[in-house]
Image (tube, rainbow, N blue to C red):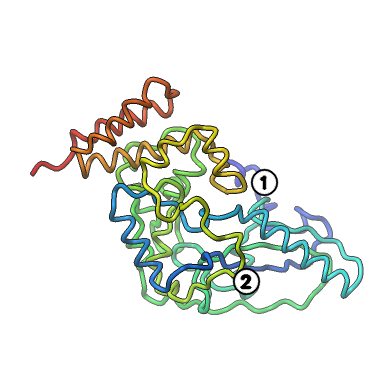
Amino acid sequence: MGYLATHGLKRARPSELVPGTVRVITARMDYLPRDTPPAWREREVQRLADPQQAVISVYARGRDYHKVLRQRLQQLADQLAQAVGPLGHRVFCDSAPVLECELASRSGQGWRGKHTLVLQRDAGSMFFLGEIYIDLPLPPTPPTTAHCGSCTACIDACPTGAILAPYRLDARRCISYLTIELHGAIPEALRQAIGNRIYGCDDCQTACPWNKYAQVSRLPDFDVRHGLDQTDLLALWAWTEDEFLRRTEGSPIRRIGFERWQRNLAVAMGNALRVQPDDAVLMQALIERRPAAGALVAEHIDWALAQRARAPQP
């Protein structure tokens, strides 16, 4: 991702990003929706097995976490200022060149898992990270020890093989990158592995044994909106651009825009056609959208329609 190269070592030098910084306060915010059942990981796996289902990463089914966490970090900074007096500070939540996972692991929030995410024994990895850069020399907290042992569940679960080795992730193969960050066409070699994942991917997290301890959020902000935890591809494909903008207001999904939303859905629908080549409704939905589609979406629709011919023969 270009911004990583643009900011260079500033990511690793907080005082260059915010002059005067001497400490970083790290925070986590759990995000599983309030009604999450104990067997939520099993449910997610079941939905992945149904090619008609539209699977969206758990974190993106509710309100945009950037706004929620940034606001609460600012409240924490204000409370700290009330206790100790004026202080220079700046809050961050996935919004600047900050090495969030490294700061979190060095400050005791958890350890880096083999999938590169931060893991905590009592919370798994289903949480957001945020930081407050401050000019107050608070005593540092020690890091925790790692507890992945010989487990390779996250590596084995990655659909595209993006986790090349423990602690080594090729973002260009990661489904979260492909469906969210990538602006152009999704590489054909990776489309089949995407399956029915249309925004993000949680496979390395649902496979991780530590996530049986993942904590449910107490905030209504992360409750599922518009039934995005149980909707199907055709229902989302039927959205107009106006409906997409209305239904994703305040959601992290809106940032990819309608074009990439349709691109992702077309890939998932093509994968469904490969499994269920006789699904006339799915085919007709793709065909009807094709004439008005822009170049990017049209190319993915054509690919999707071609998958019917690639269905396994009985």
Write the residue at 65% across / 73% down. Answer: 107
For the N terminus, give its image quadrant.
Answer: top right
Residue that extends furthest to the top in the rendered view of this protein: 291
Please state if 256 lies on the left or on the right of 155 as rendered: right
Q: In which quarter of the image is residue 92?
A: bottom right
Q: Where is residue 80 in the image (x, y as percent from the top left)?
A: 82, 71
Question: In the rendered structure, which amino acid carries the disc numbered 1?
Answer: His
> In terms of secondary structure, where does tag 1 sit?
helix
Q: Nearer the viewer, residue 39 or 115?
A: 39
Any part of residue 114 in sight: yes
Residue wearing tag 1: 7
Who comes first in sequence, dot 2 or dot 1?
Answer: 1
* Image location of residue 24, percent across then percent down: 73, 66
Q: Label 2 amino acid? A: Arg
- The residue that appears at 70% across and 52% down in the rendered structure is 10
Work out how far the residue at label 2 is from the one at label 1, CA to CA, in angstroms: 21 Å
Pointers 2 and 1 in contact (CB under 8 A)?
A: no
Image coords of residue 210 (percent x, y):
44, 74
Q: How crowded is mark 1: few (under 14 residues within 10 Å), some or many (20 or more)?
A: some
Q: Can residue 1 be seen in this view?
A: no
